[in-house]
Amino acid sequence: MLLAIDIGNTNISFGVFRENKLVKKFSIPAKSYNIKTLKVFLGRINIDTGIICSVVPKSTDILEKDLKRYLDLNPYILGKNVMVPIKNNYRNPGQLGQDRLVNAYAGTVLFGAPLIVIDFGTAITFDIVSGQKEYIGGMILPGLSTSLNALSQKTALLPEIRLEEPEEFIGRDTKSGMLSGIVYGFAALTDGLIEKIHNKLGKKMKVVGTGGNIDFIAKYCSKIDKADTDLTIKGLNLIGNNKVTGISINK
């Protein structure tokens, strides 16, 4: 079986696949990880392939060592010893996060192209794939919780609150106003950017949402066609099973 690991700034997600079937998954705060976590999650599962996608180099080193020590595996690490098999048309291809390439690749395999993939995590990223299944580019915005935290940290009178469902559209107290602004504001922003991308490229594209907050925000957006919280680890499984070396950086 294959172990897929997606290391983000906030969370680390683990998925165990038997061929293309996700049989077990688990997500924890990145700061909480230790090798005991890995042992408890895997139990007696026999893993023969490991693959890691990461935006946190220090955590990558730790997980790589733990997989070697605990499972006797030399994992595939995206951007190091395996590449995402999608043509990358970023102006400076090396600047593009491997997680964004994985999402773009997984989206085209599972849902077709042209495609917009929106990842609602610590940051919100829009990634656009052409009808020829080439990565075009995208956008980066602060995430929902990141923006909410910034309001309390950068202002004297706004409180620190958790992201949750707003009770009303027009807030009648400070907490309600902050939640309404963040949730409805980012939903409107998301729908607006999707519409602008469609107009810019002159075609309607399928829109897939993923990331830790996708199930929360999707109900407020009208232009997201499909939500898949497991898109990144599904992409890792596709790459790991095929042992693809692919194209990630233009020469």
Image: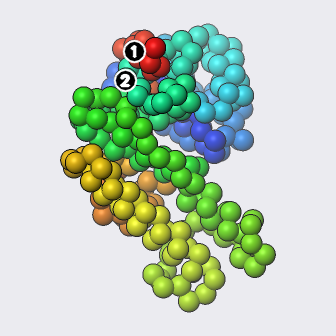
Crowding around mark 2 (Cα neighbors within 10 Å: few <14, some 14 to 19, many 20+) is many
Is residue 5 placed above or below 221 in the rendered structure?
A: above
Q: Earlier in the sequence, mark 1 or mark 2?
A: 2
Decide: few, some or many residues near mark 1? Use Cα within 10 Å; few <14, some 14-19, many ≥20. few
Which residue is at 53% across, 15% downward? 76
How is the model colour-coded? rainbow
Callout 2: SS: loop
The residue positioned 48% from the left and 30% from the top of the image is 91
| Secondary structure at numbered mark 1 | loop
Observer able to see residue 53: no
Residues 183 and 163: in front is 183
| Type of amino acid at the residue the image marks with label 1 | Gly
Tell me where residue 105 appears, x and y as whole percent.
36, 30
Could you say which disc has been placed on residue 86 in the image? 2
**Cα separation between marks 1 and 2:** 7 Å
Q: Which residue is mark 1?
A: 246
